[in-house]
Image (cartoon, rainbow, N blue to C red):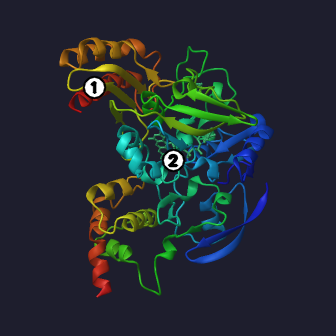
């Protein structure tokens, strides 16, 4: 097993991390950086709970990508959404619309939702469906999640005034 | 769970990559987006000694319009980026439509065109974990001497489950394949063998660098059936192409994917439409002729009988869509 130091920017902090070729990005986020908000689910790309955002603000599955591949890159995890003690509008929307039940999938669902908002601040039904199809919730269901996404811009507007 | 031990190589240039591939030989494994390679490494189906990453190779990223009206696409282009590309959407809409139907946005943000074209075959037995598989005898793919899917068979029947090969065959695409000191062009239809174990006509030291799609003015369409549209692999899919307008149709191509070890170019159904046009009656006859060309169907995600029925229905839908275009 070989180890290598990579430079990874996580939630705005640039760090040097010693990673092995046996680790995925998910392993590094959870086990090395102790950012356990990002969940380990199926580890085969089918459930989406390991979703984080890449430098372009897109949703990627941290379980399906070798950690070494992320040398020099930047990611945002669920812990990075809150700014100065204020929740992100999408997090507030999830609370207001009851889009959380047991909460296990929530970090992956929110990071997928954030990616939708990053690309489309006022997403259409089609854009929501396309962006959220890769992440599954087995208790709240997807209706309230979609309500939260549809209304994120209202909450954003409210917090800006 | 950590990945099986391996060496991870990130070559800085295409030439270095080709050398690394040659050095790694049989024990090497190309990885691009990783969405299938990492999956298979977790299932302990792939146990490479050396994993060679091509995702960031500069030489594999470009989308270049060609003077003849075609386009040359780098193998490491991300699937999502292709769906956003104005030229591709404008001139080959069935191609980008097929990609939009592939997996989920999450997977398309990571997966590459080359990875999809070179996807290894899958079946219900090998789609399970190593622990689950340990409860049954090994198969041809896992160092055993039988196939669980078609028990009487002496070869592997795992399915080519990829979406883009189906439409790229219909569009007449060509691959550029390189190894140290050599480059060749291969019509994409010739990449696929009817053998689940060795399904690609690629040597271990070869890399697909580009895909060239010629200019296509014909009507083209891609239809796919999956359990969940937003994420799942196909139960079956059909790419259809013809020229002409309305019911009049010439040069018909019909390609069927995800029912067999390789995409199937349907001959008789296409010939029927060429001689009789896209009438309701001819479309039904074409559908009737599909079954004879299916060969052995593997029951992945649904029973083989259902897949045969899906193949027939998809051919009908594709032909009806062509007529409306
Ligand atoms: C939840 C989920 C759903 C999926 N659904 C679909 C689906 O609906 N349709 C579908 O087609 N696929 C699907 N996939 C499979 C896979 O994600 C895609 O096929 C994807 O395009 C693979 O691309 P990649 O770059 O990630 O490939 P990788 O995993 O990096 O590689 C795949 C294979 O291609 C080889 N390879 C990669 N690049 C090259 C190259 N340049 N030259 C030669 N060989 C190369 C690799 O060695 C490997 O064998 C799904 C995967 C997941 C996890
Ligand atoms: S189809 Fe291939 S991989 Fe599946 S059980 Fe048969 S031999 Fe094994």
Secondary structure category for the residue under label 1: helix
Residue A3: x and y in percent read: 78, 60
Q: To which chain does the residue with label 1 belong?
A: B
Q: Residue B251, can we see it?
A: yes
Residue B305: x and y in percent read: 37, 21
Pick the front one: B14 or A88 = B14
**Does the numbered disc 2 mark a residue whose Cβ is under 8 Å from ligand 1?**
no
| Residue that mark 2 sits on | B63
Pick the front one: A153 or B250 = B250
- Determine the residue positioned at 65% across, 57% down: A69
Residue B42: x and y in percent read: 62, 46
| Residue that mark 1 sits on | B319
Q: To which chain does the residue with label 2 belong?
A: B
Mark 2 Cα-neighbour bin, 10 Å: few <14, some 14–19, many ≥20: some
Q: Quadrant of ligand 1?
A: top right
The quadrant of the image that shows the C terminus of chain B is: top left
The quarter of the displayed image where residue B180 is located: top right
Q: Residue B125, can we see it?
A: no
Secondary structure category for the residue under label 2: strand
Q: Is residue B35 above or below residue A73?
A: above
Is residue A7 left or right of B99 when viewed as pictured?
A: right
Query: Which marked residue is nearer to the observer: mark 1 or mark 2?
Result: 2
Total numbered badges shown on the rendered structure: 2
């Amino acid at each position: 097993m070989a180890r290598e130091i990579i430079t990874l920017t996580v939630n705005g902090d640039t760090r040097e991390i010693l990673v092995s070729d046996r680790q995925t990005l998910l392993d590094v986020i959870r086990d090395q950086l102790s950012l356990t908000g990002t969940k380990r689910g199926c580890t085969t790309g089918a459930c989406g709970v390991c979703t984080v955002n890449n430098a372009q603000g897109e949703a990627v599955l941290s379980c399906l990508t070798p950690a070494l591949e992320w040398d020099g890159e930047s990611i945002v995890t669920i812990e990075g959404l809150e700014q100065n003690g204020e929740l992100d509008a999408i997090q507030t929307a999830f609370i207001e619309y009851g889009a959380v039940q047991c909460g296990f999938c929530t970090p992956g669902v929110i990071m997928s939702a954030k990616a939708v908002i990053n690309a489309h601040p006022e997403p259409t039904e089609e854009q929501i469906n396309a962006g959220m199809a890769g992440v599954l919730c087995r208790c709240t269901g997807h209706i309230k999640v979609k309500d939260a996404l549809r209304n994120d811009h209202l909450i954003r507007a409210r917090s800006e005034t | 769970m950590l990945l099986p031990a391996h060496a991870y190589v990130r070559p800085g240039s295409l030439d270095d990559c080709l050398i690394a591939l040659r050095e790694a030989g049989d024990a090497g494994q190309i990885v691009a987006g990783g969405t299938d390679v990492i999956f298979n490494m977790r299932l302990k189906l792939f146990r490479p000694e050396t994993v060679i990453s091509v995702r960031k190779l500069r030489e594999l990223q470009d989308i270049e319009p060609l003077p003849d009206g075609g386009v040359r696409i780098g193998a490491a282009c991300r699937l999502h980026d292709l769906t956003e590309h104005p030229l591709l959407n404008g001139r080959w809409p069935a191609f980008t439509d097929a990609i939009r139907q592939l997996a989920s946005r999450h997977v398309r943000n990571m997966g590459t065109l080359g990875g999809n074209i070179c996807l290894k075959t899958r079946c219900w037995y090998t789609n399970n974990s190593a622990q689950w598989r340990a409860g049954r005898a090994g198969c041809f793919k896992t160092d055993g001497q039988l196939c669980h899917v078609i028990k009487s068979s002496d070869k592997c029947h795992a399915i080519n489950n990829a979406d883009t090969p189906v439409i790229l065959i219909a569009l007449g695409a060509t691959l550029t394949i390189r190894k140290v000191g050599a480059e060749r062009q291969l019509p994409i239809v010739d990449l696929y063998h009817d053998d689940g174990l060795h399904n690609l006509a690629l040597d271990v030291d070869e890399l697909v660098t580009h895909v060239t799609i010629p200019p296509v003015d014909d009507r083209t369409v891609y239809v796919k059936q999956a359990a969940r549209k937003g994420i799942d692999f196909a139960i079956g899919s059909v790419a259809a192409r013809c020229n002409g307008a309305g019911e009049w149709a010439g040069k018909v191509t019909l390609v069927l994917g995800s029912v067999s070890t390789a995409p199937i170019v349907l001959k008789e159904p296409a010939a029927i439409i060429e001689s009789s046009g896209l009438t309701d009656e001819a479309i039904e006859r074409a559908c009737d002729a599909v079954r004879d060309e299916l060969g052995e169907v593997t029951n992945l995600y649904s029973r083989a009988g259902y897949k045969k029925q899906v193949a027939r229905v998809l051919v009908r839908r594709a032909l009806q869509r062509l007529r409306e275009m």
